[in-house]
Amino acid sequence: MDHVIEIDGLSKEYETGFWRKRRTLALDGLTLSVRPGQIFGFLGGNGAGKTTTIKTLMRLQFPTGGSARILGRDISDIETHRRIGYSPENPYFYDYLTASELMDYFGRLFGIDPDTRRRRADELLTAVGIEDKDRRRQLRKFSKGMLQRVSLAQALINEPELVFLDEPMSGLDPVGRREIRELIAGLRDRGVTVFMSTHILSDIEALCDEVAILRAGRLAASGTLSDLLEDSGDARSLEIIVRGVEADEIRERVELVAGATLAAKPNGVSVIVLDETDIDAVLQIARESGGRLASISPVKQSLEELFVRQTE
Amino acid sequence: MSSPSTGSLPRILTIATNAFREAVRDRVLYNLIVFVLLITVSAVFLSELSGGHAGRVITNLGLTAILFIGTFIAIFVGVSLVWKEIEKRTVFSIFAKPVGRTEFLVGRYLGLAATLFVNIAVMGAGLSLALLFVGDRPLAAAIWPAILLIFLELSVTTAVAILFSSFSTPALSAMLTFLIFVIGHFSSTIKELAGALASPAAKAIVEAIYYGLPNYRVFSFITETSNYMLPTGRMMAGAVAYAFGLTAVVLSIASIVFSRRDMK
Ligand SMILES: Nc1ncnc2c1ncn2[C@@H]1O[C@H](COP(=O)(O)OP(=O)(O)O)[C@@H](O)[C@H]1O
Ligand SMILES: [Mg+2]
């Protein structure tokens, strides 16, 4: 099997309103494939259709067009659910159960024997940082971040090959985010494929191998993170930082250099040139006005810029 | 749509057990306290009555209370049984597991049916004790077939509540289910009405209502029981078969509706 997820022209139109029907096209012919053994980042702004995609794959909703396969089988075949895990967006569980009871209940739905259930529940709750004393409390007393952790633990109760995580970092504090990040990275190390929707860019930079960017229910961009950043950036641009001069003193002359842009920054005057052959000219101008070189570095488009560009 | 197979049974039972646990923790059994108080107070006051009167009055009152309390629970827990799970999104993690929609529906149904069973059995035991207290041994035993019939009726009411709630709001579902309960108990009146109507069209419509809606008279034996009558084996068997058949049909329709729904 080349791909663990194959989405082919998937569409979803919502009808809202009882008397006067209004239609929202949440997914508009999405086509996407995910190779095994990686952390795949599913990006997009609010309302781009990430949750809709995942819910459709989980068979919580029915597509209005197209098809999709998980682990080689059509999504209508829920037998595949034995081999996958899912953590919903803003997870919510039976609030009258304790964390341990929830894990046990879900383990039973998979037909896992009692001893294995108990052992895995303990291991997983430990891994997501739910302490012993909290495991015997009802979930109605859990904070959003704690529910998020429980959600991740329950998604792994059946030792899945593939997990779908919808905004797994939301509601977590910075320490929690780092812990969960490490946990997700650990999954990949064990060969689990992770399909993760998020809009927290630092998590994507830290975790994801490949990403897809969704915009208005369509694929806006996809590929490895480094390819995407290079592709759309001006790969050979360089930033020169000079100190000891005011930006305005050299602005006129610098801007005569083709394509150069200049800006005052806290750490000095920043000049961006399109090619390294322009460095000398800029340095010459700066020195003549009493400035000195502080640094030269290649300009990489940040993920944030890419994201903003692709989702606007 | 996956239909339940042999492998379904453990999952259905797991879901049913959890639904039962939910009812217990949501204090659905608290009504028992009200019932016990009611029966105790009436037993104490009515024990003053002469002859066999106390037993008959307590039986009538007690069985009617069991029917109404049970119907109340069946309707109010029944209409939110599935709806609440969709609304609170607890179904999301359930259906991402190898659990079919029908398995879920049947499991939730059985969980509530078990809750009602325990509930009614405890209320019945309370009634029996009250009857022993006023010295009416025959009635203390004779109430049990009537209680079983009440349970059968509640099983149907629960299924009806689930059916309505699979496509409408809890408030509307509760109203409709209650309407079915009322019509079901007055179905003989409907039949008489059909007989009395002159216009063939009107007659056909009323007859369609009579045959289309559940006939709860099949389960009614409260007045008879307080008059020391016992249902025949035939009546009991007929009621069991009717309840099973009706529940199966109603739940199948609910399942078809529910299986096509988006979980929002
Ligand atoms: N149940 C629903 N009914 C109607 N519209 C919906 C529903 N769920 C989502 N939408 C709409 O579909 C679009 C995509 O939503 P969603 O998939 O939740 O986006 P994301 O997860 O990327 O933020 C949005 O415009 C949203 O308003
Ligand atoms: Mg979302």
Image (spheres, coloured by chain):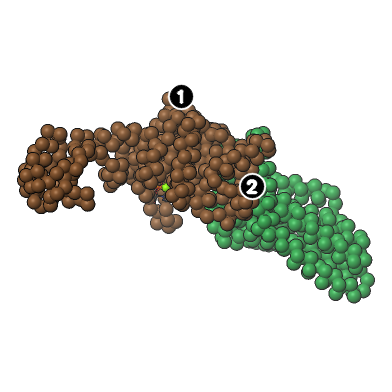
Chain colours: A brown, B green
Residue A141 pos. (x, y %): 57, 57
Residue B152 pos. (x, y %): 74, 52
Which callout, 1 or 2, points to the residue nearer the camera?
2
Chain of residue at mark 2 = A
Q: Earlier in the sequence, mark 1 or mark 2?
A: 1
Q: Which quadrant would residue B199 be assigned to in this image?
A: bottom right
Horizontally, is B158 left or right of B257 in the view?
A: right
Nearer to me, B181 or A185:
A185
Whether tag 1 and tag 2 are in contact, CB under 8 A, the answer is: no
Residue visible at 61% across and 56% down? B79
Residue A280 seen: yes
Q: Quadrant of the N terminus of chain B?
A: top right
Nearer to me, A107 or A293:
A293
Label 2: few (<14), some (14–19) or many (≥20) C-alpha neighbours in 10 Å: many
Horizontally, is B128 left or right of A211 in the view?
A: right
Q: Which quadrant would residue A196 be assigned to in this image?
A: top left
Q: Which quadrant would residue B101 be assigned to in this image?
A: top right
- Give SS at disc 2: helix
Residue A180 pos. (x, y %): 48, 43
Residue visible at 47% across and 31% down? A189
- Give SS at disc 1: loop
Question: Which residue is labeled 2 in the image?
Answer: A101
Residue visible at 49% across and 30% down? A191
Relative to B68, residue B162 above or below: above
Question: Which residue is labeled 1 in the image?
Answer: A1
Nearer to me, A260 or B40:
A260
**Distance between the alpha carbons at the discs numbered 1 and 2:** 36 Å
